[in-house]
Amino acid sequence: MAMVLALGACSLNSQAGGAYQQPEDFVREAFGGAPPEPSRLWLDSGLQAQIQEVLERDLGVLRVRYWGRDHRTAWVLEEIGKEQPITAGIVVEDGKIDQIKVLVFRESRGFEVRYPFFTDQFRGATLREGLDLDREIDGISGATLSVRALTKLARLALLLHAHSDFAGER
């Protein structure tokens, strides 16, 4: 009986974290197999202040790499969940989230945020004037910090898209 419980615990822990998709594969998929060359968005002081408002911390970089074509951008971003970074790929088209996908999850809890029942809530989300999403995102019991991290990344991707060369009229 103890061995069965131990095996079950190992099985749950193996689900908790991992690399689900390589960033380059995510970008390729986001652009139908033909990704554009990467671009860089330089973060001026005004944009850095907005980023700090979204993340509640300094991003710590002067530029962010992204991919874009027409009015579509793809971002590979990281935010701390509880203790470890969560890497997510986010596609924004015409100022709305088209897709958010957990690429690498390193925490021991909260891995449920990678499943479509959670990530599909972000589809079509936009950024309101106060840098908040235009909708509430339902949480997951036991994954509060992971939910918070992905929500921040969604807001960040929308903000960065709005300042990119592919945002359309600004």
Image: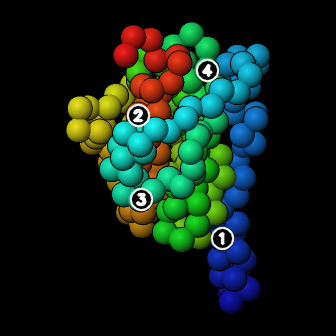
Residue 26 x/y as whole percent: 69, 33
**Residue found at the far front of this picture:** 45
Image coordinates of residue 15 in percent, x first then y, are 66, 61
Query: In the drawing, does residue 113 fall left or right of residue 55?
Result: right
Q: Is residue 68 left or right of residue 148?
A: right
Q: What label sits on residue 68 in the rendered view?
A: 4
Q: Residue at x 49, y 69 (%)?
A: 82
Residue at 76 percent across and 35 percent down: it is: 24
Whole-percent x and y of residue 153?
47, 45
Residue identifier under label 1: 13
Label 1 sits on a secondary structure element that is helix
Q: Residue at x 67, y 19 (%)?
A: 31
Q: Which mark is residue 159?
A: 2
The amino acid type of the residue labelled 3 equals: Arg
Toward the viewer: 138 or 39? 39
Q: Secondary structure at mark 2?
A: helix
Q: Classify 41 as above or below 12.
A: above
Dot 2 crowding, Cα within 10 Å, few <14, some 14–19, many 20+: many
The image quarter in which residue 62 lies: top right
Q: Are marks 1 and 3 in contact (CB under 8 Å)?
A: no
Please report the residue visible at 61 percent of the width from the left and 14 percent of the height from the top: 69
Tell me which numbered mark, 1 or 3, is placed earlier along the sequence. 1
